[in-house]
Image (cartoon, helix red, strand yellow):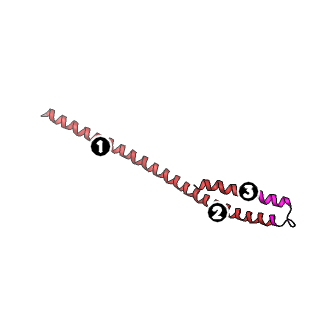
Amino acid sequence: MDFQADAIDRVIKNAIQVVENSKYQMFEILETARDELLTLNQELQLVMKETVDTLQKVDQLELNYRRSRIRLTEVSRDFVRYKEDDIRQAYEKATQLQLDVMIYREKEM
């Protein structure tokens, strides 16, 4: 009878130990999951900010590009008022803005 009581006592102690270990492991898993959630939320906020910034940049570049094309049209039409250097500068500016728009549109995707 004493042997059975010791065996039952050992089984109960082992069960308690397993529960304690499991509780610790569950706590570790929970903490890891919380840390991962925090990290992912921070990354999401960063990506969202970069997306908004990129969209705004593309909008601004497109507006500037349209204006530069208008300017290029103006200087190209009026050879009396504008010199060849003015036309070249307007063309280079329009070309650079077009490239910038393409780069940022690619980043947008």
Find the distance from the CA under tag 2 to the CA under tag 1: 59 Å
Looking at the rendered structure, the secondary structure element under dot 2 is: helix
- Residue 49 percent location from the top left of the image: 57, 58
Find the distance from the CA under tag 3 to the CA under tag 1: 70 Å
Mark 3 — residue?
95
- Residue 54 percent location from the top left of the image: 61, 58
- Residue 81 percent location from the top left of the image: 86, 67
- Residue 9 percent location from the top left of the image: 20, 37
In percent of the image, x 29 and y 43: which residue is there? 19
Q: Nearer the viewer, residue 97 or 45?
A: 97
- Structural crowding at the residue carrying mark 1, measured as other residues with C-alpha within 10 Å and reported as few (<14), some (14–19) or many (≥20): few
Per the rendered image, the range of residues in magenta is 75-96
Residue type indicated by callout 2: Asp
Image marks 2 and 3: residues in contact by CB distance under 8 Å: no
Query: Earlier along the polypeptide chain: callout 3 or callout 1?
Result: 1
In the picture, measured across the screen, residue 102 lies left or right of residue 86, that is: left
Mark 2 vs mark 1: in front: 2
Residue type indicated by callout 1: Val
